Amino acid sequence: MRYTPIFSFFVLIALISCKNTAGPITKESTDAPSGYQGQGKNPIVPTVNKPVQKQWKGVWSFDNDTTYFTNDFDGARLNGVAADGNDHYTIWITAENTPINVSPWYAFKVWTKNPREITIKLSYQDSRSRYYPKISTDGINFKPLDSTDFKAINPGEGDFGIKAVPEFVELKVRIDQEPTWITAQELYSSKRVKSWIDSLATKPFVTSYEIGRTSEKRPLHLMEISKDSTAKKALMIISRQHPPEVTGFIAMKSFIETIAGESAQAKKFRKSHSIFVVPLMNPDGVDNGHWRHNMGGVDLNRDWENFNQPETKSVRNFLNNKSSEGYEFVFGADFHSTWDDIYYPLDTIATGSKGKIVFDWIENISKRLPQKKSNVKPSGQLEPTMVSRTYFFVEHKMPSIVFELGDDTPRDFLKLKGRVAAEELMRLLDID
């Protein structure tokens, strides 16, 4: 199907920027290292369904040109293409709806009948270029675009936040007859995540099952890790409420693989603790290439008060069922991504001594990984629950945290941090 540049222009939707925020800094974080200081107070937003514009899926082609672009795969985001001449193309990227956090996800494939180098300009409606391009020839293995092939246009100011990144970027890409993937972050579609779940479920102490369905009827998969069915101390781990937040998922993946590993520490821990994991909270948003929201047009991490969305309802019902079965939830973590590594725990002013283990855990991780300091920004607010971390504590009394990893944190370090975080948490919980 031919998709012309003129028609591409008219499918663009407007984007109104709004900040994603978290709780206030309190005394426990005043000695945090310099760097990204986190975000402010969470805004209260409605979580009833809002309209979502699904992107057109197909192949873009042009008269007298042998270059093709497509968004026809899970996780793609591409809203329009113009051929500007002289092997230069402009890509338009827009959000699923507005207002929305400025997390401009993009993912597309490009190929040509006549191998050559082309230049691609990324353009966003009322946003800027947050994510440094990743490139792949198989859709599985990605690497950052070579810096010599990257040009920032109208560079930003400051170190963090959307104003700090370029307004536009241009990429030089060498293409041939086989597709090249260009994406904001690595691709982890719902199918790829399920393959990872299935690989762990081959272990005798790991099971996987559905706990609900999304608006588009995708399954919400949960992994249960436990050696002993009588182990009633439990952890609740979730990830990827926001589709582009792949670095948090990568760290979570390493975290879970460590707990499910063959070390003496992990084997001992699994005898006394059950670990429940929802690795992909927003499969609709991920597969539809959304910037932030699910197919209800809602930020899931604002729906832990009203539970208007099927994804949050499913986890709430699961937790309630397990609590009624006698499980005691002793720790909860929600893995995310932001501008740089940062922890968002609940302040002990609000949680009392029960929440101290979270700060002990952060301190132990930091001692083992001194090469990259992470700020700590506690919140003393318990009402409204609204975000997962607060709901976990208020309703199930589990010490909990939003664990944020940087968009550009080196991938090897993400995996290391996930492993160290798991080892230190197992050590602390086994002491109890």
Image (cartoon, grey):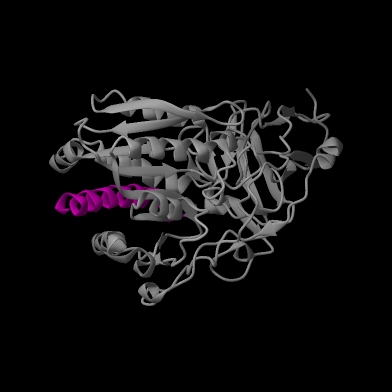
**Up/down of 343 relative to 215, above or below:** below
Residue 257, x across and y down, in percent? 29, 38
Residue 70, x across and y down, in percent? 68, 30
Residue 331 versus residue 152: which sits nearer the camera? 331
Residue segment shown in magenta: 405-432
Left or right, residue 145 beside residue 114: left
Residue 138, x across and y down, in percent? 50, 29
Residue at the image point whose x is 53% and y is 65% from the top: 39
Residue at the image point whose x is 81% and y is 38% from the top: 8
State the predominant SS element of the stretch in magenta.
helix
Q: Residue furthest front?
A: 324
**Residue 16 lies in the magenta stretch:** no
In which image quadrant can residue 64 be found? top right
**Up/down of 417 relative to 117, above or below:** below
**Residue 419 lies in the magenta stretch:** yes
Residue at the image point whose x is 49% and y is 55% from the top: 385
